Image: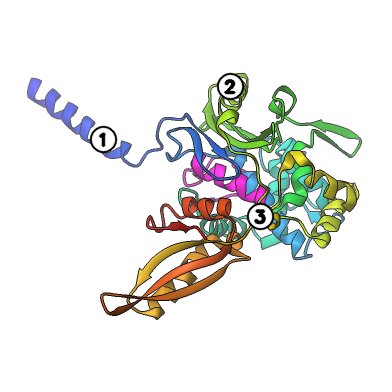
Amino acid sequence: MRRNFLRACIITLCFTWGFSSTAVAAPFSSIVIDATSGRTLQQYRASQSRYPASLTKLMSLYIMFEEIEAERLTPKTPIYVSRQAARQPASRLGLKAGTTLPAEIAMKALLVKSANDVATAIAEHISGSEAKFARRMTRKARELGLYDTHFTNASGLYHWRQQSSARDMAKLAQALLTRFPQFERLWQTSDFRFEDKQYRSHNRVVRRLSGAIGMKTGYIRASGYNIATAVQRDNKRIIIIIMGGTSAEARDRHAISLANRSLARAQPYVAKTKANTAQLHQAALWLNTSAGELANELTKPTRGMVLADLPRDWKIQVGAFSASVHAYSQLQRIRRVLGPQLENSEGRAEQIVRNGRPMYRARFANLSEPQAFHLCRSLREVTPSCLPIAP
């Protein structure tokens, strides 16, 4: 009998060990990054798998912004509510199947109310189905270098395959602020009105933390309490991600503590992109303001210099090869990974002679110093040999 008991214990332990190798790790993780350099200022288990919950909607908004720039969405575009969208669980607006709502309300509902019925309706409008939209979200995650991230829905409702990490969420938040600076005011939206009802934001950190730029909170039972927020103070900007808080209050207190401890170690903020006139006019329609007012907000001294104002005489080297064809292949590979971050750079295969033989250095030129260091950090998992090259 004792032998059978021991055998049962051994089988149970083996099963548990085998299962734990694929299970999601302990729930809490966090990271703070410098928004200018991308340098990690603090982190705790930041690369471990987590359920993103409604932080997922940051990627849904990223896709919406792309559709807006492509002129496929306007503020008044009607978003149809299907039966599938209407049956999504809370949090939701309680939309009825067969109705529509304007895209500008849908955007605010995603951010402020974290409405799951709206997330599904947007996904179906853009891609035809939520499954197709989720595949687009995952492809975009790969383009942005989010290798720990996989999406199965647009809202963040529980699915065992819908996972990310604090580090990936920080990269996504940074990409949103960098790629779409014209929509920065959106992140501080505290309320909106729809069908004679006022909806207020769940994000209390915006009101409690000096310099907070908002962004997104999230919660499902499997994830705990999550938050993504940027903080700008004293001409420094950081991005904070917390996943797995034990309560909203504990999460918010921890975010405030991380901000106060990390800002001093951040470098002066330097905006990486500059919205053009067309983008400002486009965003102004969605944010109910003027392009001039948005432009003034983006050029305040506290926001630092835009990338165009910095000398662009740095390079990065992403490999050295014995044949030029391999160097150009590497340049194409890196450009696919970094996408918009290399928009104004120039890829080169620079020839040198080493030991009497030609070698070809794969390099990107026309970069600023902060951009060069940031890009190499972004490529850490792709090519650890990335080197910033000074002029």
3D distance between C-alphas at marks 1 and 3: 53 Å
The x and y percentages for residue 36 are 60, 44
Q: Is residue 376 left or right of residue 306?
A: left
Seen from the viewer's position, the closer of residues 267 and 116 is 267
> What is the magenta range?
151-178
The x and y percentages for residue 125 are 73, 59
Query: Please, what secondary structure does the residue beneath circle 1 have?
Result: helix
Residue at numbered disc 2: 257
Q: How is the image coloured?
A: rainbow
- Give whichever of discs 1 and 3 has the lower sequence position: 1
Tell me the residue at 74%/36% (across/down).
113
Amino acid type, residue under disc 3 in the picture: Leu
Q: Relative to 270, does residue 124 appear above or below in the rendering? A: below
Residue 310 marker:
3
Residue 300 marker:
none
Amino acid type, residue under disc 1 in the picture: Trp
Residue at numbered disc 1: 17
Q: Relative to 251, does residue 346 appear above or below in the rendering? A: below
- Give whichever of discs 2 and 1 has the lower sequence position: 1
Tell me the residue at 46%/55% (across/down).
379
Amino acid type, residue under disc 2 in the picture: Ser
Reply yes or no: does residue 152 show up in magenta: yes
Q: Relative to 257, does residue 301 appear above or below in the rendering? A: below
